[in-house]
Every structure is written in structure tokens, then in C-alpha cells.
Image (tube, rainbow, N blue to C red):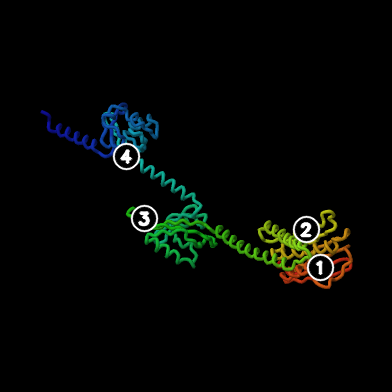
Amino acid sequence: MRPQSAELETTSTERLADLLKLSYEPMFAWKLDGAIEFWNAGAERLYGFAPNEAVGHSSHSLLQTKFPIDFAELHSQLRNKRYWAGELHHICKEGREVIVDSRMQLLGDDTVLEVNRDVTQFKALEQRLRSVAAIVESSDDAIVSKNLDGVIANWNKGAERVFGYSAEEAIGQPITIVIPKERLHEEHEILTRIRRGERIDHFETVRQRKDGSLIDISLSVSPVKNEEGKIVGASKIARDITEQKRNQEQIATLARETEHRSKNILANVQAIVAVSQSDTVDGFRQAIEGRIRALANVHSLFVETRWRGANLQTIAKNELAPYSEADDRRVQIYGPPLLLTPDVAQAMAMTLHELATNAAKYGALSAPEGRIDLKWWRDGAQLTLQWTEIGGPTVQKPTRRGFGGRIIERMINQLNGKIDFEWRADGLVCQIIFDMPP
């Protein structure tokens, strides 16, 4: 008959074995230099192998274990310290890889009890969180979190670049450090909506940098909830749209400028048609074509300067080029470089066109030895342009103003300028004076 103490010990051991078998945690036992001897229900659930498929096999071969250290080193640690803990990668029966947090204990008979906890999903989540954190940290946008009192809790590198405060300077401070005084009411409205669980998308506003400068931003704000689903704060994404706003303003300005220029061009064309006359249809067509071509030439110069204007010397050379191709001494141009605004440039282009056309028909450019001297100078805000014809046929002052003269007068009157025609015996001298901003 067995002693009672022995029976109690046997019963206790059997109960412990039953508990280990039924445990949800994957557990199995293997000889330090041998095969699996014990395999519980938790191990079967995780790995898919039934006890009869696992017992008698090497656990490392069965599960294709990937160790973080060399197995010989792990074996040595179990021998010396009788304990090892670390992360293992196992392959389940169906081929799925799992990551486990493993604890190994060496028992007295060289049996290793291995208890594993599946951390595969946790590791995947951890990786996703690291990826999100990396995205947040490397984002050019300012990404900030705050509590419901408006106190900053997180501040990424983008926020440092946008607002100028380092994370050390910003965290723990109220978000109002980046809000201009006249816009503080916006923060109260934002927090009120966040407490209601609302999301704020693409709210365009103005914020203040550490150096006091103002920037345009587009703001998106979302509620942040805790594990119980309670709103505990807000996450903000602020994008600097200062450059975008500036570009939009430039586009709007260009659109208005284009509209103004278009109307101005049409008005000039209308005026050209109104004053142009000829005895023949072909002559009328040539007169209009020449004047519109002068407008077109100067508008090509505007494109090069993005509508800031055109250089007077370039305008003069373009208009007089056809008359100096054979002999460049026939046209002499003197004057400093001078950028004319579009309105002034158009008036000068039309004026020079009319003067050159008249000289080619009746003045100095109609004679083989005739020539033109064109010069201009500036005295403060006043610009003087002088056109002198030399060596042409004898001229007399006309009894009435011609069509070209009327166009010139119209152009110069638009500039509030003065024009003087002096009909000398050897050629016309035309002097034009008007004010230009410095």
C-alpha cells in the first residue's frame, strides 16, 4: 500500500499537468538535447500541430525556429543560468509565421519548459505605429496635438519649421503662442467644435511665427479619443500656404492686368481704325496693318518682362529697323536704357511708328541721303524725347494735322504730355515731354 504523502504528491503533479495541458498560453517541454515530451492545448491552438504530431520531434525543427542569438549561446545560458527570455519567430503548420515572447526554464532533469505568448499582432501594430511616427516626424506640414485646454502635447519637425519654435519650447505651452491676438477667438471656436466630436477641414487662417511674422495656413483639426472613446484632445495639421496665397494674388493681379490690357488694346485698335484713312482700300489696309503691327511688337516685349513694360531703346530699334537695314547710319539712336510701363510703351511705339511712316513717305527717309536722329534724356521725373530729320526734301508746315499727327497727339495726350512739331527747312523736329515716375 502506497503512503498517503506519496499519493498526495502524485495527485498534485497530475493536477498541475492537467492545468498546463489546458492553459491558453502555448506551453511545451523538451529535453535540452532532445525532443518534445509535452505539448499543451495552447500550443496546438497557436501552431496547429496536435500533440501526437509534436511529441517526439525537435521543437526547433518542427517550428523552424529563428533565434535572436546563436543556439549554442542559448543552450549555454540555460545550462548556466537555468533561464532564458527573448523573442522567437516560429512557422505554424499552415505556413504562417508568428512572433512569440518566449520564456524558457531549465528543470532539474534537463527538461526545458517553454512558455510562449503570441505577440505577432502587437509587433505589426508596433511597426505601423513606428511608420506613422516616422511619417509624422518627417512631414513638411506642422502636426501638433493638444489637450482640451489647448496645451501642446506633441510638436513635430514640420511644426518647428513652420512656426519657428523647437519641440522643447512648444510642448507644455498653450497653442495660443502661434495665434495672433486678433484671432484668439478662433481657438475657442475650434475647441468647442472638437468637444462636440466635429472635425474641421481645410480652415484657412493666419498664424504667427516665433519671430512675429505672419503666415497663411490651412488648418485641419480632428478629435483625439482615449480607449473608452472619450474625447481628450485634438490633433492639428497646419500647412503653410503663404506662397500659394501669394501665387493666387499674383494670378488675380495678372488676370485684372490682362483684362485691362485687353480693353486697352481694343480701345487703341478702335482709335486706329477711327483715324485711319486712305484713298484706296489697299492703302487703308496697309495703314491699319502697320499700326496694329507696332502694337503687336511692343506687346511681344511685355511678355519677355512679364508685363512690367518694355525698354525704350528696344522699342525704337524695332520700329526703325526696316529703315536702317541697308545703311545703319541712316538711323542714329541715343539714350539711356529706360523701362517704360505698358501704357507709356504702347504710346511710344505708336508715336515712333507714325513718325517713321511719315518720314518714309514725305520726310528724311524718302531721300537717299536722309537720316534720323532719335535721342532722349531724363531730368528727374521728366522724360524728353526728340526726333530730328536731316537731309530730306525741303518741308513746309502743313496747313492741317494729318492722320498720323492726330494719332501721335492722341497717344501723348493719354500720358498728359506735351508735343511740339518744328518744321525746319531741312526736316521735321518733334519734341515730346511727359512725366514718368522715378
Between 224 and 69, the residue placed more toward the observer is: 224
| C-alpha separation, residue under disc 2 versus residue under disc 4 | 88 Å
Residue 62, image quadrant: top left
Between 7 and 277, the residue placed more toward the observer is: 277
Residue 39, image quadrant: top left
The answer to whether residue 269 shows anywhere in this view is yes
For disc 2, the marked residue is 317
Disc 3: CA contacts within 10 A as few (<14), some (14-19) or many (>=20): few
Q: Nearer the viewer, mark 2 or mark 3?
A: 2
Residue 83, image quadrant: top left
For residue 436, above or below residue 57: below
Q: Nearer the viewer, mark 2 or mark 4?
A: 2
- Point out the tag, 2 or 3, that comes first from the N-terminus: 3
Query: Residue 117 bears which disc, if any?
Result: 4
Q: Amino acid at mark 2?
A: Lys
Residue 424 in picture, x, y percent from top left = 87, 69
For disc 1, the marked residue is 430
For residue 82, above or below residue 436: above
Residue found at x 86% / y 66%: 427
SS class of the residue under badge 4? strand
| C-alpha separation, residue under disc 2 versus residue under disc 3 | 72 Å
Disc 1: CA contacts within 10 A as few (<14), some (14-19) or many (>=20): some
Q: Amino acid at mark 4?
A: Arg
For disc 3, the marked residue is 225
- Point out the tag, 3 or 4, that comes first from the N-terminus: 4
